[in-house]
Amino acid sequence: MAYSEKVMDHFAHPRNVGELADANGVGEVGNSRCGDIMKMFIKVKDNVIEDVSFKTFGCGAAVATSSMATEMIKGKTLDEALKLTNKAVMEALDGLPPVKVHCSVLAEQAIKAAISDYYTRIGIDPLPIVGEIGDCEACHVH
Amino acid sequence: MDRFVYADNAATTRVSDSVVQAMLPFFTEHYGNPSSLYHIGQEAHAAVDEAREKVAKALGAAEQEIFFTSGGSEADNWAIKGVARKLGAQGKKHIITTKFEHHAVLHTVQALEKEGFEVTYLDVYHNGVVHPEDVAAAIRPDTCLVTIMYANNEIGTIQPVPQIGRICKDKGVLFHTDAVQAVGQVEIDVKDQCIDLLSLSGHKLHGPKGIGALYCRRGLRLPNLIEGGAQESGRRAGTENVPSIVGLGVAIEEACRDIPGRTREIKKLRDALIEEVLKIPRSRLNGDREQRLCGNANFCFEGIEGESLLLLLDFNGVAGSSGSACTSGSLDPSHVLLAIGLPHEIAHGSLRLSLGDYNTMEDVRHIAEVLPPIVQRLRDMSPLWDEIIKAEKESN
Ligand SMILES: Cc1ncc(COP(=O)(O)O)c(C=O)c1O
Ligand code: FES
């Protein structure tokens, strides 16, 4: 199993890592049993993600996908961010080994969870907009 | 960072110069087939015999009891499947093993379970050591085999093999031990220790990869695993891997020449390493502190995940390993760490550093210098670590 140079770069130099003090949306997905937890912090203004950060407990791919995902949604509208798929994150990283696909799923879900939290905080039901945030499929295998 | 520290000797070892030198002529000069009658064949034959003598001597066995294989995995498969086929036919379909065997053993007995064998997996307790009395209690009239590793590959714990061997002998049950990690590190005498079958591998003792041996006690005739030509007294077919067999012979002779002296030196390094690493908050040593292989140190660091740790260590010139989910391509953490009772989230953050003959105190100092900031860096980005710290504050 080998990681692409992009994955290694994002793992070695993660972008937007840490906690966002003035976040108005926070989402956490995964669980420590599986070995991955991803937490996303977003700061939304006028429907635009002005700032974003993450904290991740997980493997190299989990860190790299979190990092890449934050870069891909920064400055985007909420609708645009919701369209971000795990596939797009993987492609941006020049691919992931097959066993690491679940990490990219986690990144997509972490964004959705953060946006849901934002909508909930401003009194809007997120379900019709964001939809259900399923569990990581890999989680159900064991 | 120029320094490179190889601290994964339990995974494999550097082949020693003397082993390489001993092997080389068998590629280009004495390349004959040992079964051939002309002189370069007979030279190869003599070299295989000499290597067999060396392996036998290292184990306190006779030459006729040593069979070369393609490695530890094949030896394990042969011993276990062989006994199961031989005695299963007589209705003995119960096997005793432990929860934390190498997969070469675990997957083999699991395959036999599908064929109708019943397997008892003994507990290894929190320190990773089997209790001999549990072995005695598990033996039944239909038990065909007890297979328990000599030393564990992940946490390095050494099992009470002589006591287990005695129990098996008294009860008339065959005893196999996977000694891949133990040979050259622990004094082994198959007769004194009542071992019927023993697996070993070349690449853990500065020999080549892809070569190993099965010791099979005289008088115990197992069905063949590999059928074909009449090599290895008709019991293991295939043209002998002469260079590797020669390499294994030299390697095992060197490894077993002065076990107390060699292990004393490695242990000094290992103990210094353990002392340094355990200064990291919320770290622990896995496996019994005393009853462990001289080079093995296996740690858990709460709040971080093993693969990330390995990658960052690699950036800093340190090669180690982890029983963590991701490295093995399966999502479950190490079965060994779960067997000693660690919760999943802690088992994910494990690090095995295994030192060997080529390591120095400089290596230990390098690891001690680079490891703590790496652990801290990963904890700083870990939401799980935040929770641990929060819980700690609340309980204070
Ligand atoms: C305990 C144990 N058994 C078996 C094996 C397999 O040996 P080999 O790699 O020679 O097949 C190993 C190491 O890989 C091991 O550590
Ligand atoms: S979140 Fe990764 S396996 Fe479930």
Image (spheres, coloured by chain):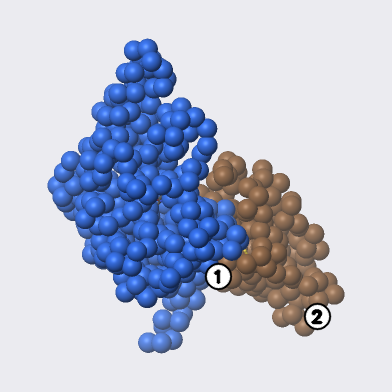
Chain colours: A brown, B blue
* Residue B56 or residue B395, whichever sits in front: B56
Question: Could one spot residue B243 in this view of the protein?
Answer: yes
Residue B133: assigned label: none
Q: Residue at x 21, y 55 (%)?
A: B192
Q: Residue at x 74, y 70 (%)?
A: A134
Expressed as whole percent of the image width and height from the top left, the position of residue B342 reads 43, 71
User: Can you name the residue that lies furthest to the right here?
Assistant: A128
Q: Residue at x 34, y 48 (%)?
A: B219
Label 1 vs label 2: CA separation?
30 Å
Are the numbered discs 1 and 2 placed on the same chain, yes or no?
Answer: yes
Residue A33: assigned label: 1
Mark 1 vs ligand 2: CB under 8 Å?
yes
Q: Chain of mark 1?
A: A
Question: Could one spot residue B364 in this view of the protein?
Answer: no
From what the image shows, is residue B10 above or below residue B48? below
Q: Chain of mark 2?
A: A
| Other residues around mark 2 within 10 Å, as few (<14) / some (14–19) / many (≥20) | some
From what the image shows, is residue B193 above or below residue B243? below
Residue wearing tag 2:
A125
| Other residues around mark 1 within 10 Å, as few (<14) / some (14–19) / many (≥20) | some
Expressed as whole percent of the image width and height from the top left, the position of residue B128 reads 35, 67
Q: Amino acid at mark 1?
A: Arg
User: Can you name the residue that lies furthest to the bottom here?
Assistant: B395
Q: Secondary structure at mark 1?
A: loop
Expressed as whole percent of the image width and height from the top left, the position of residue A22 reads 60, 72
From what the image shows, is residue B36 above or below residue B325? above
Q: Residue at x 36, y 58 (%)?
A: B175
